[in-house]
Amino acid sequence: MNPFQLLPIGLVRSTRTDAADTDWGDVVSTIVLDPRFDESALRGLEEFSHVEIIFQFHQLSEAGVCTGARHPRDDKRWPLLGIFAQRGAGRPNRLGVSRARIVALRGRELDVRGLDAIDGTPVLDIKPWMAEFGPRGETHQPAWCAQVLEGYFD
């Protein structure tokens, strides 16, 4: 496969500098667009309640990347799972996806609540959350998911 490069569209500004796996729900972050974008790039987002943010786990070293299976949060209490069966940071392309509530829009800055990305995180894309792109039909997940994520967004 051919490698390709992505150029961040902006950066996260936040008081959170540590990527602890708890208490992201009330964190308000600001996504500041790169100067190559003018404020019209965000026009219309105020009509939506949520956005999906695609970002890079920029502090993850090559040694932290998993190409096989691991325990969620490297905790042996949880099942051994393939990296694509979990949402951990150690993904091959170091990409994170998070849904966050829109709080405010000011020029080239977008304030969001509940984005689990730390200060300085490169943002690769912003997409408005549309119900039609959510799951169709019933959803299900293993019980361990709720256990692992307890307190994550509290």
Image: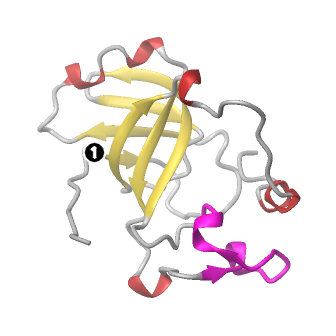
**Mark 1 surroundings within 10 Å by alpha-carbon count, few (fewer than 14), some (14 through 19), many (20 or more):** many
Q: Tell me if 59 is positioned left or right of 82 in this view.
A: left
Tell me the residue at 20%/64% (across/down). 4
Q: Is residue 4 above or below residue 50?
A: below
User: Is 3 colored magenta in this rendering?
Assistant: no
For the record, the magenta segment spans 69-87
User: Is 86 colored magenta in this rendering?
Assistant: yes
Q: SS class of the residue under badge 1?
A: strand
Q: Indicate the quadrant containing the N terminus: top left, top right, bottom left or bottom right.
A: bottom left
Per the image, the residue denoted by label 1 is: 10
Q: Is residue 132 above or below residue 151?
A: above
Give x and y (percent) for residue 87.
61, 61
Q: Indicate the quadrant containing the C terminus: top left, top right, bottom left or bottom right.
A: top right
Tell me the residue at 14%/38% (across/down). 35
Give x and y (percent) for residue 127.
41, 32
Tell me the residue at 52%/23% (across/down). 130
Q: Is residue 138 above or below residue 130?
A: below
Toward which corner of the image does residue 113 lie, by quadrant? top right
User: Quick check: can you spot residue 20?
Assistant: no
Nearer-the-camera pick, 8 or 109: 8
Q: Tell me if 85 is positioned left or right of 120 in this view.
A: right
User: Quick check: can you spot residue 53?
Assistant: yes
Give x and y (percent) for residue 74.
69, 80
Nearer-the-camera pick, 139 or 57: 139
Q: Tell me if 116 is positioned left or right of 57 in this view.
A: right
Give x and y (percent) for residue 25.
67, 41
Tell me the residue at 85%/59% (across/down). 147
Q: Amino acid at mark 1?
A: Gly
Q: Tell me if 39 is positioned left or right of 116 in this view.
A: left
